[in-house]
Amino acid sequence: MVATKKELYQDMVTFYGNLYGLPPLNAKIYVYMMIDLKTDGYTFDELLEKFNVSKSSLSNSLQMLVQNKYVEYITPIDSRKRYYRINPKFMGIRFGNILEKLVREKELMQRMVQCNKQVKHPNEQVIKGINQYITILDKHIRTVESTVKSLHQ
């Protein structure tokens, strides 16, 4: 099945909207910038024309995308306009966030094992399962650490 660009766009809007918890307009802007990648970016007016929304809605969406580092803006030396574009460092930021969550979960699981060992009759099967999960987390932490390092080079 060959998807059209429009179908791809809609699927990506749904996916990234759910993944990042983005409001619909924010997801549409983000995906639009991903699909129609312009390295010099889009002006506010270009985006306003494309999405046909109020200035305040667009402004709020762009502000949220910039705040969360999904998008950045540049102001060329010979222009007063801001140009919005996908943040080229975003993948590194995203994997860094994933790494933080994996490390935090590992710490919590280790604490859970310690708590379970302190009870009068510890459930060894539960402790064994948690330890297996910690081993899996360790493997993923190493993989994501390697990815983060390569993205920052």
Image (tube, rainbow, N blue to C red):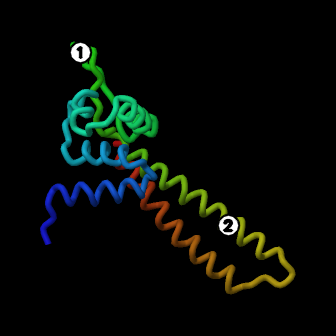
Disc 2 versus disc 1: distance between alpha carbons? 54 Å
Q: Residue at 25%, 34% (x, y): give it.
A: 47
N-terminal of the two: label 2 or label 1?
Answer: 1
Q: Residue at 68%, 82% (x, y): give it.
A: 126
Can you tell which mark lies on residue 47?
A: none
Residue 42: x %, y % from top left = 23, 31
Q: Residue at 35%, 44% (x, y): give it.
A: 25
Q: Hey, what amino acid is under mark 1? A: Ser
Residue 79: x %, y % from top left = 23, 15
- Residue 29 located left or right of residue 102: left
- The residue indicated by pointer 2 is 110
Is residue 143 positioned above or below 152 on the image?
below
For numbered disc 1, what is the local secondary structure? Answer: loop
Mark nearer the viewer, 2 or 1 = 1
Is residue 53 positioned above or below 21 on the image?
above
Residue 84: x %, y % from top left = 29, 31
- Residue 51 located left or right of residue 144: left
Residue 36: x %, y % from top left = 18, 44
Q: Residue at 24%, 27% (x, y): give it.
A: 45
The reply to whether residue 41 is in sight is no
Q: Residues within 10 Å of mark 2 (few under 14, many from 20)?
A: some
Q: Quadrant of residue 133?
A: bottom right
Q: Quadrant of residue 19?
A: bottom left
The reply to whether residue 94 is in sight is yes
For numbered disc 2, what is the local secondary structure? Answer: helix
- The residue indicated by pointer 1 is 79
Quadrant of the snapshot with the C terminus: top left
Residue furthest right in the image: 120
Q: In which quarter of the image is residue 88?
A: top left
Q: Hey, what amino acid is under mark 2? A: Gln
Quadrant of the snapshot with the N terminus: bottom left
